[in-house]
Image (cartoon, rainbow, N blue to C red):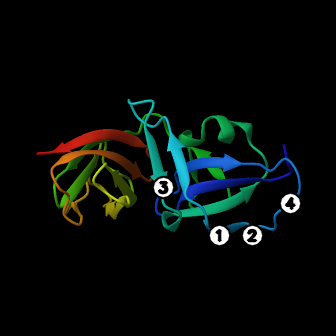
Amino acid sequence: MSETMTVYFASQTGHVFGAVTRAAGTIPTPPRAPSLEDVLVLNVGPEKDAELLVPAADLSTLVLLPNPDLLLQHLAFQVSVQIDNVERLPPNATVSGVVLASTQVEVSVSASVAQDAAVWVLITGPTLPTPRVAVGVIKQGKLKTDPPLLLQRLDPGTYRVLALVRGHPPVARSERIP
């Protein structure tokens, strides 16, 4: 393992999608930077063979000392608010609902948030040439995005949805629009 590790995380919420070390050579990398690479996320949600491609435009990187847990359980971590370290996501906080409609998506959590919580939603599907992304916030003391996050119109069909809420483990599921 090299002396440093590059962590790829959602710029909006801090959720870690992956981490890499380099076995040989060094590539000069700033401590924090926008990502130049898309990240393929595997095994998210109940459909263990599902793959989600997260666009580089929605990612940032952070260089840290190696942490083997990040390599093995990256989805259990988020980058700290100070963006200088990673922390484990609390296991008892849950995203309890994702409701997808043709022009909006609503995300809810199991308990009201103590402070404004950033929300980032990725939507993929066979009819979408590129993923759709919606961003917003669950306001302090609330249980859901209100109003719902607006989307460019989606055609009827089945979509994969990845929802991230700051301080909550990620949730992925299939949603159908009739």
Extreme-left residue of the structure: 178
Q: Where is residue 119 in the image (x, y as percent from the top left)?
A: 37, 58
The residue indicated by pointer 1 is: 33
Q: Distance between the residues labelled 3 and 2?
A: 21 Å
Along the line of sight, the residue nearer the viewer: 111 or 75: 75
Amino acid type at circle 2 is Pro
Residue at the spot 71% in from the left edge and 49% down from the top edge: 20
Neighbourhood count class around disc 2 (C-alpha, 10 Å): few under 14, some 14–19, many 20 upward:
few
Neighbourhood count class around disc 3 (C-alpha, 10 Å): few under 14, some 14–19, many 20 upward:
many
- On the picture, is 67 further left or further right than 100? right
Along the line of sight, the residue nearer the viewer: 174 or 15: 174
Q: Distance between the residues labelled 1 and 2?
A: 6 Å
Neighbourhood count class around disc 1 (C-alpha, 10 Å): few under 14, some 14–19, many 20 upward:
some
- Give the secondary structure at mark 1: strand
Mark 1 or 4: the one toward you: 4
Residue at the spot 66% in from the left edge and 41% down from the top edge: 70
Q: Distance between the residues labelled 2 and 4?
A: 12 Å
The residue indicated by pointer 2 is: 30
Q: Do the residues labelled 3 and 2 touch (CB within 8 Å)?
A: no
Q: Are marks 1 and 2 in contact (CB under 8 Å)?
A: yes
Q: Residue 54 carries which label?
A: 3
Mark 2 or 4: the one toward you: 4
- Give the secondary structure at mark 3: strand
